[in-house]
Image: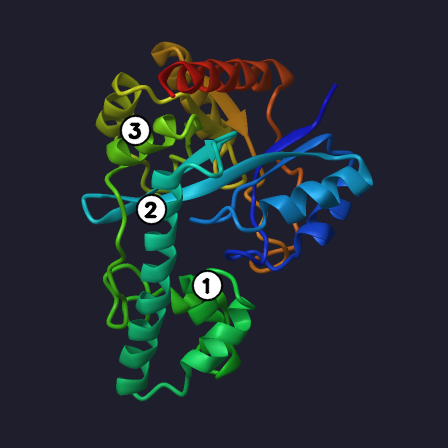
Amino acid sequence: MARIDLHTHTIYSDGTFIPETLLRLAAERGLDRVAVTDHDTTVGLAEASAAGREVGVEVVPGVEFSTLYNREGVHILCYYMDQAHPELQVELRRLRDDRFLRGERMVEKLQAMGYPVTFERVRAIARGGNIVRPHVAQALVEAGVVPTLKEAFSEELIGSGGRAYVEKHALNPLDALALIHRAAGVCVLAHPGTWRETKPVPHSLIDELADAGLDGIEASHPEHTPEVEGRYVEIANRLGLFFTGSSDCHGDRYDPPRLGMRTTRPDQFELLLGRAAELRSAAARNS
């Protein structure tokens, strides 16, 4: 049976692996398909696809969209989109530019609080990719401010609403869904059990997204217990959506590489592929 992991990150956002390393590990672990879904960028997809061909692993093109609902982040996974779609790329560029400025402002706040971190170091940690909070957290760890990345995400530092936290630009989830569909992308709600730390995405929002055309739910995730996973499978079935499973691998940033720890059932992946074909056909008719 095919092994499919539909959520991973590389150095082009907050992962620690270059695409080649990620795909080589995927081959070693017996994965057949891996989605590369960096935050708010498609920059690494061509490199990842080439690396996948070298090792015999099919790369599913994707991106993880940042959205905001009640001032809290909701992540939306997008698959098989038209990577050249102008409106999609404009929004992704706006998100990336905002991440850069946000990183600068967080560092400025930390410096004003007396913490010895620099934006130059944060940029070096990001290695040319998107600047995200884990890069700032790593700079805090290196400076000896906190012992672990997790402890940087506190009220004192860069946790949501923390003293050095800076709000980010992001679309409403419903607007992001509409944009993804205009770009012929399949839209999946990512790890809904981990919205506000351990609090889940509100069921009312999931219903709204389903009414607006949401395609699937990421039910199986390393931070979902079996009970939580079962609940999201039930919700997906009730709403007529497919469900996926993914490792959300970030390399070795947070833990030993968890690539392949959770996977998507082949029958559910076939439903995703069918939806992708429908969206491409609709886009072709409307062009």
Q: Quadrant of residue 171?
A: top left
Q: Position of residue 206 (x, y in %)?
A: 29, 26
Above or below, 194 against 283 in this view is: below
Residue under circle 1?
Answer: 134
Q: Are marks 3 and 2 in contact (CB under 8 Å)?
A: no
Q: Is residue 224 left or right of residue 181?
A: right
Q: Amino acid at mark 2?
A: Glu
Residue at mark 3 to residue at mark 2: CA–CA distance? 12 Å
Residue under circle 3?
Answer: 178
Which residue is depicted at the point 36% across and 85% down? 115
Which residue is depicted at the point 47% across and 22% down? 230
Above or below, 278 against 121 in this view is: above
Q: Quadrant of residue 210?
A: top left
The foreground one among 226 and 122 is 122
Q: Amino acid at mark 1?
A: Pro
Residue under circle 2?
Answer: 91
**Regarding mark 3 in the picture, which secondary structure is present there?**
helix
Q: Position of residue 76 (x, y in %)?
A: 39, 37
Q: Position of residue 227 (x, y in %)?
A: 46, 27
Which residue is depicted at the point 40% across and 13% down? 285
Residue at mark 1 to residue at mark 2: CA–CA distance? 22 Å
Q: What's the mark number on residue 102?
A: none
Toward the left, the furthest residue is 70
Q: Amino acid at mark 3?
A: Ala
**Disc 2: CA contacts within 10 A as few (<14), some (14-19) or many (>=20):** some
Mark found first going from the N terminus, 3 or 2: 2
The foreground one among 3 and 229 is 3
